[in-house]
Image (cartoon, coloured by chain):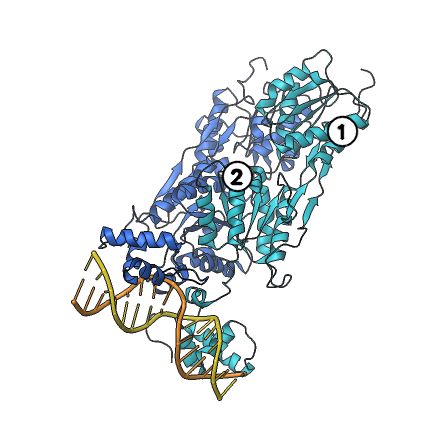
Chain colours: A cyan, B blue, C orange, D yellow
DNA sequence: CTGAAAGCGCTTACAG
DNA sequence: CTGAAAGCGCTTACAG
């Protein structure tokens, strides 16, 4: 008989209604073997009629193998920008596909309570896994908490790779190299360069790719054509003035990211120059703005969304009981290190060197 | 004596070590009254020495008032764009402040499994609250699941307000009205207008604000100067051509959002026009691009991040035991309806009408 | 294949 | 202010 009070039905209610023992009910709701189809059907019916739902607390208290939470975290350290957002979109698509939920958390890597907050996250939400972006990818405190709690994680573009930890990244140096080759193929020899913020790995890698391409093409780099920017639009305005107002103006400018390239384009307009004829411009990142500029910007598209998706694939493949044995609490060694392809996006801001110069 | 095996210590271990009853331990770890300082100190010491941590499952099984999860959800229906991301940033800042975690979930409002997914979210994560953006704000299935589960939520810019449900929004019509007044104050009378996607409330509200300002200024609207855009950059390229290639070109153009305004600027450059002298241009939204255009774009800044923060403030104030009684499971009636101030951002893309025309 | 019993680690009455 | 007892709803051995 159905319980007459308001309390939620328990397996005892289900058992008495189905005319079986509570153990049999337990077996059915946990999809264990060794239950006759007849029993299973009776229990299923009783569960449906009563609207029975497992009490997770009671289960969790007895169960040796704690249930999965189906929650993973995206952890990042910098104030959320487009990059973080795009990573999230990719990751979310995989969460949806694999049936996980995503909790996002910005952890100030300089704050002393980062350990407490990470622990709180792991404990409260019983994280099944995590995906980290720089600079958290290399934060010993955060990694330590996750390691200790046995929470598997994937790092996106970590500063230093580790053999036993999986990661996902793109090859920024190679991308900058290819972009520079594009400029060189158009006949440009005097190429200005606007650097990014010191200390960022992107600043170094993009510069190295540029320098390598120049060197391999037998072109020398004019140090007076190198400007120090800061990745933001306004940081590059003076750089653009310096470069474009010279008598011996460079015929092309490589800005270390699109925002700074947009600054070059703005200053060129202000000075009455015609782009790309008077100067070719390239950026890096392919932010939404790049397509809306006049002229539209030649740049490198980092597959940021796919970076997030790839990290999710790595994580969920590992977490899925179908693809990994129940004992595989460790990543294989060496752990997977995925390098995703970028695209060099050729648009209107680059043109062949004018012969008539 | 400390337990010799590996099992985690329980309150029984703590009690025996501290020489008190388990009930006293329970009182201390739950911060109840009626415990002498002496007892409290002894228990605290035992807890620290043993590294005791409450077993949440055991607690949850007995506790009448289920513990808070300290998890709230951001629910949205459209593929995550800058708007969703900015809402999230604001919401996250309040989550951090109030000590909550944020889970994000994209719910396809046309999908049949939206109910199952919402229920799974509520059940698995034991949501303490939620923040919804359009079009989920008006989705009966989602709201129904939340209502039934007793999960309080705040809606951002819902299509239809409800007296008993809190909401946060800005006054888009008034913003469009003010932006148009700016154009009119500069002497513009022939103003082109590019509409957004049909069916979107933004399309209607921005148009209404424009029309009202024109009407109040005694200016008539030339129907041939109204173009149908689609909010995206490329959707407005033909609109811009139509408007700018006319012999009787409008002296100003109001694009219903910044992407479309960027298209107007690009086409103007392409046609060799000088901005803003030949034509003033305004947009709406203040996307990051707007500052990087040449000329930089006059537009309306919606405080999207603050919209998210305000929603969080509403929700957390309600959830906080300090500010709301334990029985206040309902919002007050009428529920709070917050309208946030926008900014009209004057930049370089608008100028006074040239007398010499 | 099925079931009766014990017990997980807490909180809830209730008694003093 | 403190404590002894009962019991929450399950799962884990164990027995048949």
Helix, strand or loop at label 1? It is helix
| Image label count | 2
Does residue A206 lie above or below B139 as drawn? above
* Pointers 1 and 2 in contact (C-beta within 8 Å): no
Q: Residue at x 52, y 47 (%)?
A: A144
Q: Residue furthest top?
A: A247
Q: Which chain carries label 1?
A: A
Spatial distance from mark 1 to mark 2, Cα to Cα?
A: 31 Å
Left or right of residue A277: residue A114: left
- Residue A102 is situated, as x and y percent measured from the top left of the image, at 52, 51
Residue A199 visible to the viewer: yes
Residue B251 visible to the viewer: no
Left or right of residue B32: residue A45: right
Q: In which quarter of the image is the C terminus of chain B?
A: top right
Helix, strand or loop at label 2? It is loop
- The residue where tag 2 is placed is A77
Of A122 and B313, which appears nearest the observer?
A122
- Residue A196 is situated, as x and y percent measured from the top left of the image, at 62, 27
Q: In which quarter of the image is the N terminus of chain B?
A: bottom left
Q: Which residue is drawn at 60% across and 45% down?
A: A155
Of B191 and B95, which appears nearest the observer?
B95
- How packed mark 1 is, by other alpha carbons closer than 10 Å (few <14, some 14-19, many 20 or more), is many
Of B211 and A191, which appears nearest the observer?
A191
- Residue A92 is situated, as x and y percent measured from the top left of the image, at 57, 50
- The residue where tag 1 is placed is A212
Residue A57: mark in rendering: none
């Amino acid at each position: 008989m159905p319980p007459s009070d308001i309390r939620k039905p328990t397996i005892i209610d289900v058992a008495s209604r189905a005319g079986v023992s509570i153990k049999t009910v337990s077996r059915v709701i946990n999809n264990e073997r060794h239950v006759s189809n007849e029993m299973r059907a009776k229990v299923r019916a009783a569960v449906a009629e009563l609207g029975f739902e497992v009490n997770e607390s009671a289960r969790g208290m007895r169960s040796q193998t704690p249930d999965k939470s189906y929650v993973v975290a995206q952890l990042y350290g910098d104030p959320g920008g487009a990059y973080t957002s795009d990573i999230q979109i990719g990751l979310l698509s995989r969460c949806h596909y694999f049936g996980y939920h995503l909790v996002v958390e910005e952890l100030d890597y300089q704050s002393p309570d980062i350990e407490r907050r990470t622990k709180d996250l792991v404990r409260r939400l019983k994280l099944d896994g995590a995906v980290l972006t720089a600079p958290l990818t290399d934060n010993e405190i955060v990694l330590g908490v996750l390691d200790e709690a046995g929470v598997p994680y994937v790092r996106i573009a970590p500063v230093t790779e580790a053999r036993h930890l999986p990661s996902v990244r793109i090859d920024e140096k190679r991308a900058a190299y290819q972009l520079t080759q594009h400029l060189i193929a158009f006949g440009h020899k005097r190429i200005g360069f606007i650097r990014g913020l010191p200390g960022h790995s992107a600043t170094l890698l993009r510069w190295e790719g540029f320098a390598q391409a120049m060197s391999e093409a037998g072109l020398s780099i004019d140090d007076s054509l190198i400007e120090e920017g800061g990745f933001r639009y306004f940081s590059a305005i003076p750089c653009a003035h310096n470069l474009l107002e010279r008598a011996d103006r460079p015929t092309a400018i490589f800005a270390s990211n699109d925002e700074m390239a947009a600054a070059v384009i703005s200053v060129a307009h202000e000075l009455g120059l015609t782009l790309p004829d008077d100067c070719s411009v390239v950026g890096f990142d392919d932010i939404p703005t790049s397509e809306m500029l006049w002229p539209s910007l030649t740049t490198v598209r980092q597959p940021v969304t796919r970076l997030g998706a790839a990290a999710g694939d790595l994580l969920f493949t590992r977490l899925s009981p179908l693809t990994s044995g129940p004992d595989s609490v460790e990543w294989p060694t060496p752990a997977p290190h995925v390098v995703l392809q970028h695209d060099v996006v050729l648009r209107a801001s680059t043109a062949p060197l004018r012969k008539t110069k």
